Amino acid sequence: MRLKQLYLLPIIVVLSIGCAKQKPAPQPSFLQGTYTGPFMLIHMHKNSTKPDTSKATVLLSMQANSSYQVSGDTSTLHAGSHGTFVINSGTIIQFFDQTYPFTGTPAKIHLSGTYQFTYDNVVLRLNGNDPADTVLYQYVLQKIY
């Protein structure tokens, strides 16, 4: 009898895991709105303990249809752009910039690629990096409407 109970235990565990409610991935509409705040480019040099930091104030508009637009201070550091985005999980968002050049290196930073994000219904934080370099990208944007 005890042997039969041991065989039933893994079956019960598998069934209970399969029947457990899965938390759905967040939908793009929960990020819908307009955000403003600093974009920071942080570059850590190999022989230095202090990073170089550059800033620009950007305006990010995100729509429920998964499109976005970047404007604001786009004169020197950050490019004005637009495109679409996808939320890959509760903490990863990927931007597809339609203005990103197909060849060469862009003169300004574009909101493009994969970023880790947090959002508390007021502040949207995006953190990304250039995998080929020691450069970090950080957006700390407050929802204005």
Image: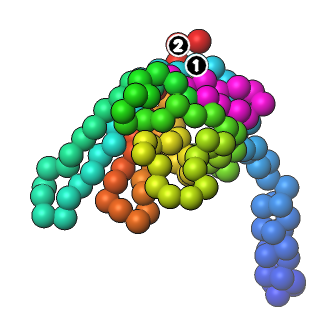
Residue underneath mark 1? 34
From the viewer's side, name the closer residue of 83 and 4: 83
Instruction: Name, please, the residue furthest toward the bottom.
Output: 3
Residue shown at the point (78%, 68%) measured from the top left: 13
- In the image, which disc is placed on residue 144? 2
Query: Is 66 inside the magenta-drawn segment?
Result: yes
Q: Are marks 2 and 1 in contact (CB under 8 Å)?
A: yes
Residue sitting at x 52%, y 48%? 115
> How many angstroms separate mark 2 from mark 1 (CA)?
6 Å
Q: What residue appears at the point 79 percent right and 53 percent down from the top-left corner? A: 20
Quadrant housing the C terminus: top right
Image location (x, y in percent) of residue 101:
58, 50
Pinpoint residue 51: horizontal percent, then vertical percent. 20, 49
**Within the magenta stretch, is there residue 144?**
no
Q: Quadrant of the N terminus?
A: bottom right
Which residues fall within the magenta stretch? Answer: 59-69
Within 10 Å of the Cα at label 1, are there few (<14), some (14-19), or many (20+) other Cα atoms? Answer: some
